[in-house]
C-alpha cells in the first residue's frame, strides 16, 4: 500500500512525493541509472521481450534484485512511481508474437523514465508496449501494479491495466493510493463536499450555542484509517489545503510533512494468518520526494528518518549504474557536548 | 432522490419477490394511481412546449395525447399531479409501476443522463424517455426480455418528443435511470450514459441515485466490516478496559470515574460507522446492508412489511434536507413524498403518502377495471391516493 501526492511551489517548481508500504522487505537501494543503459523486457513465456536503451539518465529506488526503478525521476524532470493495485489489475493479453514489444509489470517505470520527457510523450507512446502478466519469480505471483507519472510542468496521469485494457486517467490533483481503480477514488471525493479547511461557525440550537472544541473542525469526520479510499481523501485534503511553498526546496519539506500522516507504524496493518510462523504487517518502508525542477531525489526510511538526497544532474556523465545503500540506523543528534552517536552504539 | 430495494426469499417452495421504492422530491406534488388494461391502446399525454416566456398555465393547459402502443399486460403505476391533485403535471405517463406479467419498473433521479440517438431502422422502437416506464410495463414480463430488446437494438430511449422540446431541454429536466425487477427475482439497472444504454444485472437489488451504479457496487465493499452482531471483545488500554458499545468494563475495578465512556450500553455496535445521512451513496449502503441483515421473509405479509421497514430507514423527514433561495430563505424540503411496495408474485401494489402513515393497496385480482367486461379506456383510469387518514379505527 502506498500514498502519493503532488505540490507546486510559487516558483512553479513541481515536487511529488510518496510513501511505500509493504509487508516484506523489498531489499531496496537507491540506483542511478545512466544514459544508454539497455534493458530487456520479461515475458510470460520466457521469450526475450522488448529491448530498449535509455535516452535519459534517472535516479530512484530499486529493489528485489531487479535492474529497474520502482520509483524515480529522470533528467527531464519526469517522475514515475509503481503503486500496488490488487484485485483490480488485469494486464494485457499476450501471445508469443508480441514478445518483441512486451515488458513485465515491474519494468514499466524504467521503460518510461528511460525514454520520455513529459506526460504527453508517455501518453503518446504507452500503447506501443504490451504490459503482460509475467510472474515475478521471487514472489511467485504476477505482481498487481498501477503507475503514476508526473512531469515538470505539473501534469500527471495514472496508468491502469484493467480487464486487459490500458486506462489512462488524468490526475488533476496529483494524488494516488491503491485499489479500487483511480476513477472510483476521484468520484468518491464528491462524498466530502462541505468539508472546509476553515473552522466551522458556531451553531445555535434553541437556547444553546454549540462551538468547536478546538481548531480543525472543518474537516471533522475526515476518514482517518489507512484503507486506500481513506488515504486518498486525506491526501487530497492535506495536499490541497497546505499553504503554497515558496520554493521547490520548501515544497520538498512540505511533502515530507504531509506524508508523515501516511507513515504506517509496523503492526497497525496486519495481514491475517502467518507465513512460516511470521505475521506480516504492512508498514512504511520508505518515503520519497522527487523535485522535478532540480531532479534531486530525496528519501528517508522506516529505520532512519533523516532525509537523504541524490543529485541526478551531478551524475549525468556516469557510464554504469551507481548504487547507494539505504540501510542505516537512526542518527540522533545528541546535544550534550560530545560527537553524535548512533543508537545502539551509544553503549560501546 | 429515491431509494429502490428488491426483497427475494423462498420458503417451502413458495417464492416471495417484493420491490419497494421511495420517491423524494423538493417541491410539492400530488400522486395518483393509474391503471392500464391489457389489449387496450396506451394513450399518454405530453406537455407542449409553450411560446416563451414559459407560463405554467400554458404548459399545463393543453396536453398533447400520444398513442404509445397497445399494452400486452394489465399494469398499475403512479403518476404525478399538481399538488392539489386537480390535473397531471408533466404527463399521464407513470414513473413507477407493476404489470400482470410480474415486471416492476421504477425511474429514479440520475443527473447527467444522456439518452440514445434515434434510429431509423424499421424494427427499432424509439421511445421518448418520459414514456419509458409505460413502454416497459406494456411490453415485457422479465428482465431477460428487456435485455434482449436492447441487445437486438429493437428499443431505444430517446430525448426526442412530440411536444416540441429540444433534446438538451429534455436532458436538463428529465434525468433518470431505471430499476427493473421481475417475478423470478431478477433485477436490472438501466442507465443512459453518454448517449448509450448501459444495462447491468443488479446483484444486490438496491438502487439510489448518483454516481453511476458500478461506483456504488464497489463502494459497498468499503463497509464489509459491518456486522449485525454486537462485539463482545474488550479493548484494553493498559489497565483501562472498554467493552462495546463504549461502556467501561467492570473489570478491573478501581478505574477512576473520569475515564467512563460516554457510550450508551446497548446492542448494534456492529453497525457503528454505517452512514446515516441521506446522500445517495449513504442510502445505498444503509439499505443494502440492512437488507442483507434482515431475516428472510417467510410469508407474503412479512415480505411486504420488510419492504416498508427498509424504506423507513431512508424516510426523509420534512425539514432534514432543505434548500435555500438566493435571499437565503429556506424554500424547499426534500421529502419522501410517496412510498410504494409492489408484490411481484401476487400482483399487489401498496402505496403510502408522506402525510399519512397508512398504506393503501390495490390487488390486480380484484381491480374492477382489470375484470373481464370492463370498458376499455385508452386514456387510462386513475384514482386519488388518500392522504387524510392517520390510522384505521380500532373500534370500527
Image (cartoon, coloured by chain):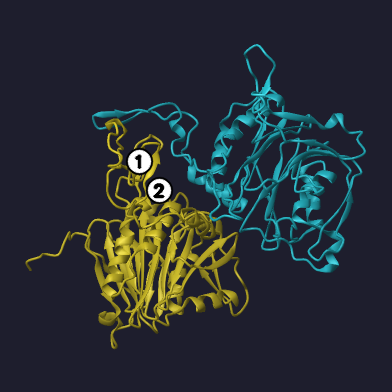
Q: Which residue is mark 2?
A: B273
In front here: B186 or B238? B238
- Does residue B389 appear to the left or right of B108 in the view shown? left
Query: Of callouts 1 and 2, which one flags the residue occurring earlier in the amino acid sequence?
Result: 1
At a point 64% along the width and 31% down the height, the residue shown is A255
Q: Chain B shown in which color?
A: yellow
- How many numbered tags mark residues here? 2
At a point 70% along the width and 16% down the height, the residue shown is A339
Residue A332 visible here: yes
On the image, the x and y values in percent for residue B388 come to 19, 59
Crowd band around label 2 with a 10 angstrom C-alpha radius: few (<14), some (14–19), many (20+)? few
Residue found at the very far left of the displayed protein: B395
C-alpha separation, residue under disc 1 versus residue under disc 2 = 21 Å
Q: Which residue is mark 1?
A: B241
- Does residue A172 appear to the left or right of B203 in the view shown? right
Q: Secondary structure at mark 1?
A: strand
* Image mark 1: chain: B
At a point 75% along the width and 66% down the height, the residue shown is A93
Kindly indicate which chain is depicted in cyan in the rendered structure. Answer: A
* Image mark 2: chain: B
On the image, the x and y values in percent for residue B77 come to 35, 70
Crowd band around label 1 with a 10 angstrom C-alpha radius: few (<14), some (14–19), many (20+)? some
Amino acid at each position: 500500500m502506498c500514498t502519493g501526492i503532488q505540490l507546486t511551489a510559487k516558483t512553479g517548481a513541481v515536487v511529488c512525493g510518496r510513501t511505500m508500504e509493504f509487508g516484506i522487505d523489498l531489499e531496496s537501494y537507491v540506483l542511478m541509472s545512466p544514459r544508454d543503459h539497455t534493458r530487456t523486457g520479461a515475458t510470460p513465456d520466457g521469450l526475450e521481450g522488448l529491448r530498449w536503451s535509455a535516452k535519459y539518465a534517472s535516479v530512484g529506488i530499486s529493489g528485489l534484485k531487479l535492474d529497474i526503478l520502482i520509483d524515480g525521476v529522470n533528467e527531464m524532470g519526469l517522475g514515475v512511481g509503481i503503486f500496488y493495485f490488487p484485485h483490480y489489475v488485469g494486464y494485457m493479453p499476450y501471445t508469443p508474437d508480441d514478445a518483441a514489444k512486451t515488458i513485465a509489470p515491474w519494468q514499466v517505470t524504467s521503460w518510461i523514465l528511460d525514454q520520455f520527457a513529459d506526460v504527453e510523450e508517455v501518453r503518446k507512446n504507452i500503447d506501443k508496449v504490451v504490459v503482460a502478466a509475467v510472474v515475478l519469480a521471487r514472489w511467485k505471483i504476477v505482481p498487481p501494479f498501477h503507475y503514476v507519472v508526473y512531469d515538470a510542468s505539473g501534469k500527471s496521469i495514472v496508468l491502469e491495466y484493467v480487464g486487459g485494457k490500458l486506462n489512462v486517467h488524468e490526475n488533476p490533483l496529483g494524488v494516488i493510493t491503491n485499489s479500487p481503480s483511480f476513477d472510483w477514488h476521484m468520484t468518491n471525493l464528491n462524498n466530502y463536499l462541505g468539508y472546509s479547511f476553515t473552522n466551522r461557525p458556531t451553531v445555535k440550537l434553541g437556547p444553546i450555542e454549540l462551538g468547536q472544541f478546538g481548531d480543525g473542525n472543518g474537516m471533522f469526520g475526515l476518514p482517518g484509517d489507512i484503507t486506500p479510499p481513506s488515504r486518498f481523501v486525506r491526501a487530497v485534503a492535506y495536499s490541497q489545503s497546505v499553504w503554497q511553498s515558496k520554493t521547490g526546496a520548501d515544497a520538498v519539506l512540505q511533502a515530507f510533512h504531509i506524508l508523515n500522516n501516511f507513515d504506517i507504524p509496523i503492526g497497525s496493518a496486519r495481514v491475517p494468518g502467518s507465513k512460516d510462523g511470521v505475521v506480516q504487517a504492512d508498514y512504511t518502508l520508505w518515503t520519497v520526494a522527487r523535485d522535478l525542477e532540480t531532479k534531486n531525489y530525496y528519501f528517508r526510511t522506516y529505520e532512519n528518518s533523516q532525509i537523504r538526497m541524490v543529485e541526478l544532474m551531478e551524475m549525468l556523465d556516469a557510464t554504469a549504474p551507481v548504487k547507494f545503500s539505504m540501510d542505516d540506523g537512526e542518527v540522533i543528534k545528541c546535544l550534550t557536548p560530545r560527537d553524535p552517536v548512533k543508537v545502539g552504539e551509544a553503549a560501546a | 432522490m429515491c431509494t429502490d430495494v428488491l426483497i427475494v426469499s423462498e420458503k417451502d417452495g413458495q417464492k416471495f419477490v417484493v420491490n419497494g421504492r421511495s420517491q423524494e422530491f423538493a417541491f410539492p406534488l400530488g400522486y395518483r394511481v393509474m391503471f392500464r388494461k391489457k389489449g387496450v391502446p396506451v394513450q399518454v399525454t405530453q406537455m407542449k412546449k409553450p411560446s416563451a416566456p414559459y407560463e405554467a398555465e400554458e404548459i399545463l393547459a393543453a396536453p398533447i395525447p400520444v398513442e404509445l402502443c397497445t399494452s400486452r399486460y394489465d399494469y398499475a403505476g403512479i403518476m404525478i399531479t399538481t399538488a392539489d391533485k386537480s390535473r397531471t403535471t408533466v404527463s399521464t405517463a407513470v414513473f413507477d409501476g407493476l404489470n400482470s406479467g410480474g415486471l416492476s419498473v421504477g425511474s429514479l433521479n440520475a443527473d447527467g443522463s444522456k439518452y440514445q440517438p434515434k434510429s431509423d431502422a424499421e424494427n427499432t422502437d424509439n421511445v421518448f424517455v418520459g414514456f419509458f416506464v409505460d413502454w416497459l410495463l406494456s411490453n415485457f414480463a422479465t428482465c431477460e426480455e428487456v435485455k434482449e430488446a436492447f441487445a437486438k437494438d429493437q428499443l431505444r430511449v430517446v430525448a426526442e418528443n412530440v411536444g416540441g422540446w429540444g433534446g438538451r431541454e429534455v436532458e436538463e429536466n428529465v434525468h433518470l435511470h431505471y430499476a427493473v425487477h421481475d417475478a423470478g427475482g431478477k433485477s436490472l439497472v438501466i442507465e443512459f450514459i453518454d448517449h448509450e444504454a448501459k444495462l447491468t444485472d443488479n446483484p444486490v437489488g438496491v438502487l439510489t441515485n448518483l454516481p453511476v451504479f458500478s461506483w456504488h457496487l464497489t463502494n459497498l465493499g468499503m463497509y464489509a466490516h459491518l456486522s449485525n452482531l454486537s462485539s463482545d471483545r474488550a479493548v484494553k488500554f493498559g489497565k483501562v478496559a472498554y467493552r462495546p458499545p463504549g461502556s467501561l468494563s467492570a473489570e478491573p475495578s478501581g478505574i477512576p470515574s473520569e475515564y467512563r465512556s460516554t457510550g450508551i450500553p446497548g446492542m448494534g455496535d456492529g453497525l457503528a460507522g454505517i452512514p446515516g445521512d441521506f446522500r445517495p451513496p449513504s442510502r445505498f449502503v444503509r439499505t443494502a446492508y440492512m437488507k442483507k441483515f434482515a431475516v428472510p421473509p417467510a410469508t407474503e405479509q412479512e415480505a411486504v412489511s420488510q419492504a416498508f421497514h427498509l424504506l423507513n430507514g431512508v424516510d426523509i423527514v420534512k425539514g432534514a434536507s432543505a434548500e435555500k433561495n438566493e435571499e437565503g430563505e429556506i424554500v424547499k424540503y426534500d421529502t419522501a413524498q410517496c412510498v410504494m411496495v409492489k408484490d411481484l408474485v401476487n400482483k399487489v401494489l401498496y402505496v403510502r403518502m408522506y402525510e399519512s402513515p397508512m398504506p393503501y393497496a390495490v390487488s390486480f385480482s380484484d381491480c374492477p377495471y382489470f375484470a373481464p367486461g370492463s370498458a376499455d379506456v385508452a386514456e387510462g383510469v386513475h384514482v386519488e391516493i388518500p392522504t387524510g387518514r392517520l390510522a384505521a379505527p380500532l373500534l370500527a
